[in-house]
Image (cartoon, rainbow, N blue to C red):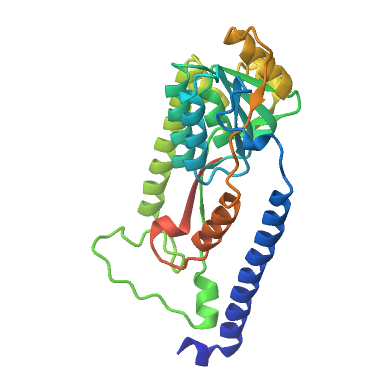
Amino acid sequence: MFSRRHPFLFFLIIICGCMTLAFIGFVSLIYLSSKMMDTGFSESLGSRKGNIGVVEVLGPILSSKKIIENIKNFREDDDIKAIIVRIDSPGGGIGPSQEIYRELIKTRSEKIVVASMGSVAASGGYYVAAATQGIVANPGTITGSIGVIMEYANLMEIAKKIGISSVVIKSGEFKDMGSPLRELKENEKKIFQDLVDELHLQFVSDAARARNMKIDTMTSLADGRVYTGQKALKLKLVDRLGNMGDAVQWAGELAHIKAKLVPVYPREDKMMFIRELIDTLFKNINISGAVSDNFRYVVK
């Protein structure tokens, strides 16, 4: 039994688990308490008082479900004449970024969609922004970082020290490719490199197509480096410099809104934060040998 061979380590794992659950409970209490006192504009999804919908993409892009739901709601609301995608994100998962991108491409055929970049709109954040009809960035916004990265942690030496050995029964040569308990073979490295290259090409192609830019030009800018908003404007990665207010004003002009411009935010799900926190924690607590669990594929 692992608990008998390594009682200290077993006890430490139990303690960490209890502390994690206690932390989740504490954060949940603080978050819900604060939201009970929040009666601001976030309660106005579908409000007849607003004519510009604001969809926020904040933090790492781990899931697209809520963002796509907000985009659809604003797209189907006749009172909403334009949509602002407010992005403050360093990037995230390829799948969620692509799903948001596709939804925005569909939406901009029906309504004006403008991106407003905050402090950071890089990698997956730029992927999302590229799908809009216009991008507004601050001069000091950190953007770009167009590329894909795959991170791999090898725990073989640690496993040896604590007495863990890997026993693998597999159906194919590459089924355990990326196991943290053994070295990565050269032919496996090539497979992963080909995968990264293919995903990178998807990113570059989508961004170039949405921005009406030649693929060769976008490729030359997509080596992973970051740019300021001011530099990105010169490189035609963004269209204007300005803040959120400037993005609202521009969206109103593009949508030919004659009335007073009134941004409206989606109704906030008070439990969404808790669910996402729990999902993220339990996704990361995984010791499976499968490649999908040990590599992180992110646009970064």
- The quadrant in which residue 83 appears is top right
| Residue 52 image point, x, y percent | 61, 21
Left or right: where 122 falls relative to 173: right
Q: Pick the quarter of the image with the C terminus.
A: top right
| Residue 184 image point, x, y percent | 42, 59
102 up-or-down from 24: above or below:
above
Q: Nearer the viewer, residue 69 or 60?
A: 69
Q: Which residue lies furthest to the bottom in this view?
A: 4
Instruction: Name which residue lies at 45% across and 90% down.
Output: 1
**Residue 112 shows up from this direction:** yes
Q: Which of 133 and 144 is in front in this view?
A: 133
Instruction: Name which residue lies at 55% across and 74% down.
Output: 158
| Residue 50 image point, x, y percent | 62, 23
Instruction: Name which residue lies at 49% across and 19% down.
Output: 78
- The quadrant in which residue 122 appears is top right
| Residue 60 image point, x, y percent | 59, 44
Left or right: where 191 falls relative to 200: left
78 up-or-down from 124: above or below:
above
